[in-house]
Image (cartoon, grey):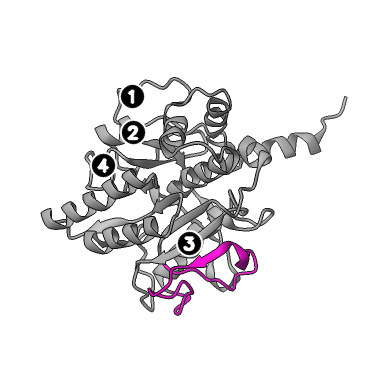
Amino acid sequence: MFCRKGSFWREANRIMSPVDVGGLAELMEKTTGVREIVIGLIDGPVALDHPDLDAGAIREFPGGRSAACSVSRSEACIHGTFVAGVLIAKRGSLAPAICPGCSLLIRPIFREDARPSGESMPSATAGELASAILDAVGAGVRVVNLSVGIEEPSTRGDRSLEAALDYAAWCGTLIVAAAGNQASIGSTAITRHPWVIPVVGCDAQGRPTAESNLGSSIGRRGLRAPGDKIVSLGTGGKPVTSSGTSTAAPFVTGALALLASTFPGASAAQLKQAITQSGGHMRRSLVPPLMNAWAAHQALAAGECR
């Protein structure tokens, strides 16, 4: 009797794919998304000339920093291009390419430096971030991805950020945010806001990564998503491998964009309820449950979300 190496190898590769962690594979098989669903990428600029990005999917915020990289080796460009690849790279590329059928509105917030600092999660001031969120909401995006930390926290800055997040909630713009990579227990002005979905990174087995921040607000309202050794688009033609919560956040953002594409009549509250509450998870831990995008799809299809 001979082993069927080919079928075993295909199954092993399927299991190891990051999109199989959190029920994304089934949802991605159903749809690539629709152009009417716009994702707001508040991040660095993007290498728009990358062959695995469809220029027709990308929109530039008018009047702000250019969406295109001016320094391809900068941390801002590398980070923005990586996250864009997770979301809208062409299917078949090395990147996860969750929702290439959706649109991506790029609102750069990170300054381009000549050399990357090695940080996996760039930061911006609370005021800069608040202004970018207001811009994205005003542009009509459906979901905002925040793979960003806050530098120099202040009471005044926190208030402006809270007001911007309140406005996003009032307008029905979903906000997905990285929980942070300091391996600490606690929260920030972003992750403690009740409208925000904080995201913790996990490995291929769904276990939270060691560097991910945890906390009561993160455990109550957040999710775990793939954030360990993820491969996505890089600058200069070379793919990049990265880990952390800023890597995990776009997996949740992409799942929400696919759900919004499949259920165009669903409200923001229904989409948020579906992605965070499907599966009957008990929210009594500092560690959030693993995202189950397919269970969220089934909940919406069954009319379980009100």
- Which mark identifies residue 283? 1
Q: Which residue is mark 4?
A: 193
> Is any atom of residue 120 visible in this view?
no
Residue 243: within the magenta? Answer: no
Are the residues flagged by discs 1 and 3 in contact, CB closer than 8 Å? Answer: no
Q: Which residue is mark 3?
A: 105
The answer to whether residue 58 is above or below residue 184 is below
Q: Which residues are magenta?
A: 44-73
Label 3: how many Cα within 10 Å (few below 14, some 14–19, many 20+): many
> Sequence-wise, which precedes: disc 1 or disc 2?
2
Alpha carbon separation for disc pair 3 and 2: 26 Å
Out of 270 and 297, give the one closest to the viewer.
Answer: 270
Residue drawn where x is 51% and y is 33% of the image: 205
Farthest residue in the left direction?
155
| Local secondary structure at mark 1 | loop
> Sequence-wise, which precedes: disc 1 or disc 3?
3
Which corner quadrant of the image does residue 48 belong to?
bottom right
Q: Nearer the viewer, mark 3 or mark 2?
A: 3
Q: Which residue is mark 2?
A: 221
Instruction: Give the amino acid at mark 4.
Output: His
Are the residues flagged by discs 4 and 1 in contact, CB closer than 8 Å? Answer: no
> Sequence-wise, which precedes: disc 4 or disc 3?
3
Magenta stretch mostly in which secondary structure? loop
Q: Is residue 226 left or right of residue 88?
A: left
> Sequence-wise, which precedes: disc 3 or disc 2?
3
Out of 98 and 215, give the one closest to the viewer.
Answer: 98
List x then y, in percent, for residue 44.
Answer: 41, 66
Residue 60: within the magenta? Answer: yes
Are the residues flagged by discs 1 and 2 in contact, CB closer than 8 Å? Answer: yes
List x then y, in percent, for residue 269.
Answer: 40, 35
The answer to whether residue 197 is above or below residue 107 is above
